[in-house]
């Protein structure tokens, strides 16, 4: 079984409506957070900063201390089973205009309840629920 490690972030911004969370629409149709594979020599937070810049154009990220969580799951790619581990951080930004990369079809900023309902996978929903009380 192949192993894959990624890092991502639950990114939010303050708005007049309260905290708004960024979700990305992936080509397979699912909605999830910014994340990507860790490149050789990269620390987890460096991966998050690079992926956010590449996928959304966001460059002003501030990590929220005290939140780091991991999810694990399996998926298939080209007939191979992949075991994936993703480390998630909580981060804030002042950016609201997103410049999507070719890796995504759409994005949205949503309040907590709406974002929770839109997330496709239970693993993402479970990580997201942990940020509600922070």
Image: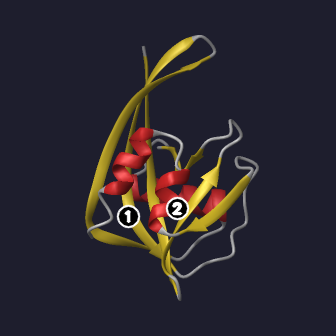
Q: Quadrant of the C terminus?
A: bottom left
Q: Secondary structure at mark 1?
A: strand
**Is 36 situated above or below 91?**
above
Q: Check disc 2 and report the residue beneath it.
A: 114
Q: Is the Cβ of the residue at disc 1 closer than 8 Å to that at disc 2? A: no
Q: Foreground: 71 or 57?
A: 71
Residue at horizontal 45 percent and vertical 42 percent from the top = 6
Residue found at the far bottom of this picture: 16
Residue found at the far left of this picture: 66
Q: Check disc 1 and report the residue beneath it.
A: 90
* Percent x, y of residue 89: 37, 59
**Is 44 situated above or below 38?**
below
Q: Secondary structure at mark 2?
A: helix
Residue 33 seen in the figure = no
Q: Quadrant of the N terminus?
A: top left
Residue at horizontal 56 percent and vertical 55 percent from the top = 51
């Amino acid at each position: 079984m192949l192993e894959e490690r990624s890092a991502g972030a639950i990114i939010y911004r303050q708005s007049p409506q309260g905290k708004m969370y960024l979700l990305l629409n992936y080509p397979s149709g699912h909605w999830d957070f910014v994340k990507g594979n860790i490149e050789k020599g990269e620390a987890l937070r460096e991966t998050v900063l690079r992926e956010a810049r590449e996928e959304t154009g966001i460059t002003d990220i501030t990590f929220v201390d005290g939140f780091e969580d991991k999810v694990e799951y399996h998926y298939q790619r080209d007939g191979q089973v992949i075991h994936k581990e993703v480390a998630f951080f909580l981060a804030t930004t002042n950016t609201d205009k997103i410049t999507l990369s070719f890796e995504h079809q759409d994005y949205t900023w949503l309040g907590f309840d709406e974002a929770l309902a839109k997330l496709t996978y239970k693993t993402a929903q479970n990580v997201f629920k942990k940020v509600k009380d922070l």
